[in-house]
Image (tube, coloured by chain):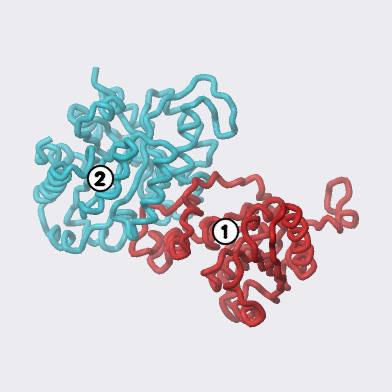
Amino acid sequence: MRKSFKEALASGKFLVTAQIVPPKGMDIGTLTPIVKDLNDVVDALGIADNPRAVMSMSPWGICRLVLENGGDAIMHVSCRDRNRIALQSDLLGAASLGIRNVLCISGDHIRFGDHIDAMPVHDLDSVQLLETVRSLTQGRDMAGQKLVGIPEFCVGAVANPEADPLPPQLLKFQKKMQVGIDFVQTHPVFNLDNLVPFVDQAREKGVKLIAGVRLLMAEEVSSYKDGSYPGLFIPEDLLAEIQGIKVEKSVEIAAQLIKAMREKKLCDGIHISAPGHEGKIMNIIKAAGI
Amino acid sequence: MIVGTRKPFSEIKDVVSGDSKILIVGCGTCVAVCLAGGETEVTILASQLRIALGLGGHDVHIDEAVVERQCDREFLVDLSKKKNVTDYDVIVSMACGAGVQLLSDVYDQNLVVPALNTVFIGVAEGPGIWTERCQSCDNCVLAETAGICPITMCAKGLLNGPCSGTRHGKCEVNAEIDCAWVKIYDRLAARGDLECISKVLPPRKNSRQAHPAVLTHEAYKRRFVKDEKIV
């Protein structure tokens, strides 16, 4: 049997995770072979929760697909669409389906999505959600009521080393570590020096830092520039470099970033995202020599 | 109109108990009308604090002031003329949340704490124009967040720091708008008060917000409330 993500975290190996965006609809025909292939090479697949506020299948469904095909899944849990009752209820439901890893996030704002008149909930923020998950794993809900049957979760948080300015980000990251997390996954990083304060503080607290790496596509440059992707901040010179390039070159750029991060020991692992181009994740992993 | 209620006395006392020079500032408009922060209420709070802090052995000097509208810069000019505001350790504002935040903007070197919880809204930026500063959550955190309300000023209403979308200090939702958490951080950093936001703020107490809200002053309950119903 394959090792769980929790065991991989504890093993000290260089971690590799990748992101899967669930489909808008019921068809998982394209996704299934990608999930099967990636399960063989990654430590876990992170399943996004309606990223960019674009409505898609609940991450539960794809987490089950990952588990049934021999992999481990990290379920993203966004505070944007559910109040504290629904969040806790869904976490218990996920645990009952065998999902053991969760990534707690605030969630991209609804204005980026395809349901712009939806109510943004944010009853809890990501720090408070982390506290809630901790409470559930200790056998109590947020109201202090005792649970019958206690879930186990390996808990992750998010940080963005490319946010500007960084000090408020670091302050929030410190709060997340203060609550207690097992790993932190960053947004895509391009200026590697920005990882330094995050990885230093994470290591001080025994938290594993998984650095974000994103496949940059030439045809999406205008969207990168106009802010359509919240939290994705690409340096101007890199945007110029990817103008008109072929996907093979994009894969190479991502692989080079991974190599540089590993060489400089700026992270304990990487998280690869390639929304809409998940089939290229395997190419990136191979090109990076992992 | 803006309606507010005074915080429990123990909460106000706890916030100012380490300070020796306190300025209590009332507001002569909305919250005076709803009997929460006008001239009479300033006098009462000042007296309560003098007694309570005095009994606790604190050597405290408390001044009182009332401005016609704390939510309008025009009227704060008078306050500056009458009081040397920067001399005070703490300003206790008896305005609505909007007034507290405007005091914090104008006197950003001072600690400004709210004495009221606001039930509903805004500040005047100038004649005929108002901006939202408060969502009347009845659970004021302005003492911790530098007089800037993260629930209103952050697009996601986050209580424990910025989301991941801050770029050049601006909000991910609208590049024209400052990130509330960057403003909070910068103001506290300038004052050397980052400790204020180092602790995890708990989830909001949504049960305090009942819509549509009705507030009947204690003294008027006999007239307007019968069998716990408004008549």
> At numbered mark 1, what does the secondary structure look like: helix, strand or loop?
loop
Label 2: how many Cα within 10 Å (few below 14, some 14–19, many 20+): many
Chain A display color: cyan
- The reply to whether residue A117 is visible in this rendering is yes
Q: Is residue A78 left or right of residue A226?
A: right
The amino acid type, in three-letter code, at marker 1 is: Leu
Answer with the quarter of the image where residue A156 lies: top left
In the foreground, A61 or B77 = B77
* Residue at x 83% of width, y 49% of height: B229
Disc number placed over residue B142 in the picture, else none: 1
> Which quadrant is home to the N terminus of chain B?
bottom right
- The reply to whether residue B132 is visible in this rendering is no
Mark 2 chain: A
Mark 1 chain: B
* Residue at x 46% of width, y 27% of height: A137
> Which quadrant is home to the C terminus of chain B?
bottom right
The amino acid type, in three-letter code, at marker 2 is: Gly
Chain B display color: red
* C-alpha gap between disc 2 and disc 1: 35 Å
Image x and y of residue A57, in percent: 37, 38
> At numbered mark 2, what does the secondary structure look like: helix, strand or loop?
strand
Q: Is residue B157 left or right of residue B40?
A: left
In the foreground, A165 or B61 = B61
Disc number placed over residue A184 in the picture, else none: none
In the foreground, B204 or A282 = B204
Relative to A256, is A142 above or below? Answer: above
* Residue at x 41% of width, y 36% of height: A180
Image x and y of residue B110, in percent: 55, 67
Image x and y of residue A168, in percent: 39, 55
Q: Which residue, given by chain and number where applicable, does mark 2 sit on? A: A212
Answer with the quarter of the image where residue A179 lies: top left
Q: Is residue A35 left or right of residue B172?
A: left
